[in-house]
Image (cartoon, rainbow, N blue to C red):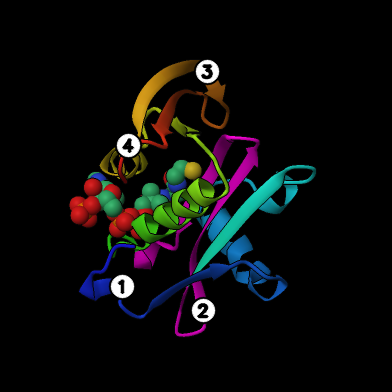
Amino acid sequence: MTACPENSDIEVTEITGDHYDVIRKICAECGVNNFLKLTAGYSEIKKVAVLNGQPVGYAVMLYLLDDGEICTVCVAKEHRRKGIGSLLLESLVNEGKQLGIKIFNLEVRAENSPAITLYEKHGFTITGKRKNYYSNPIEDALVMSYYENTSI
Ligand SMILES: CC(C)(COP(=O)(O)OP(=O)(O)OC[C@H]1O[C@@H](n2cnc3c(N)ncnc32)[C@H](O)[C@@H]1OP(=O)(O)O)[C@@H](O)C(=O)NCCC(=O)NCCS
């Protein structure tokens, strides 16, 4: 777990029903689909970062056997660049490793340099590209992967 003075008051914990209203707002602010609609039928890890009792970010991963698919990492705008995205990503990967996940994949908009930099900082590398994968606006996706035997 990363320790840094700016996020020493942040707690990363499991998402419960109490967090949903604020998380829906963060979804809208980040321009991503409401994760609650995406996860039905899969095993999942859902994490929320809480500051002074308020959710300030969340992250979701689906997994099957040793394969994890990180669906999203989102942080409320006013709380970005404080290490919260890193805490959430590390929390997913560390718990995933304990569950036996060996490969972690994700898709990210090709122009989303904050997210790409975040993932690269944590050991993910670009392993593929999906042409016109996203709509509104149409954009390519980069596939990024992280393998369990490398350090995060
Ligand atoms: C991507 C996102 C989750 C990063 O969250 P965050 O809490 O700001 O990230 P951190 O503070 O942990 O940053 C970790 C590293 O990521 C990189 N990074 C984060 N934001 C960045 C930015 N705007 N520009 C460049 N690098 C950035 C930096 O390397 C940073 O380390 P540093 O602050 O020591 O330089 C956040 O910007 C966000 O919610 N974006 C909208 C949703 C989204 O696009 N999610 C990802 C796709 S699903």
As drawn, the label of residue 132 is 3
Q: Earlier in the sequence, mark 4 or mark 1?
A: 1
As drawn, the label of residue 7 is 1
Report the mark closest to the observer, 2 or 1.
Answer: 1
Q: Are marks 4 and 1 in contact (CB under 8 Å)?
A: no
As drawn, the label of residue 59 is none
Secondary structure of residue under mark 2? strand
Secondary structure of residue under mark 1? helix
First to last magenta residue range: 50-79
Report the mark closest to the observer, 2 or 3.
Answer: 2
**Which residue is tagged 4?**
150
Report the mark closest to the observer, 4 or 2.
Answer: 4
Could you give the CA–CA distance between mark 2 and mark 1, rounded to whole angstroms? 14 Å
Could you give the CA–CA distance between mark 4 and mark 1, rounded to whole angstroms? 25 Å
- Tell me residue 15's x, y (percent): 62, 66
Q: Earlier in the sequence, mark 3 or mark 1?
A: 1
**Which residue is tagged 2?**
54
> Which residue type does callout 2 highlight?
Gln
Report the mark closest to the observer, 3 or 4.
Answer: 4
Q: Earlier in the sequence, mark 2 or mark 1?
A: 1
Q: Which image quadrant is residue 52 in?
A: bottom left
- Tell me residue 62's x, y (percent): 63, 43
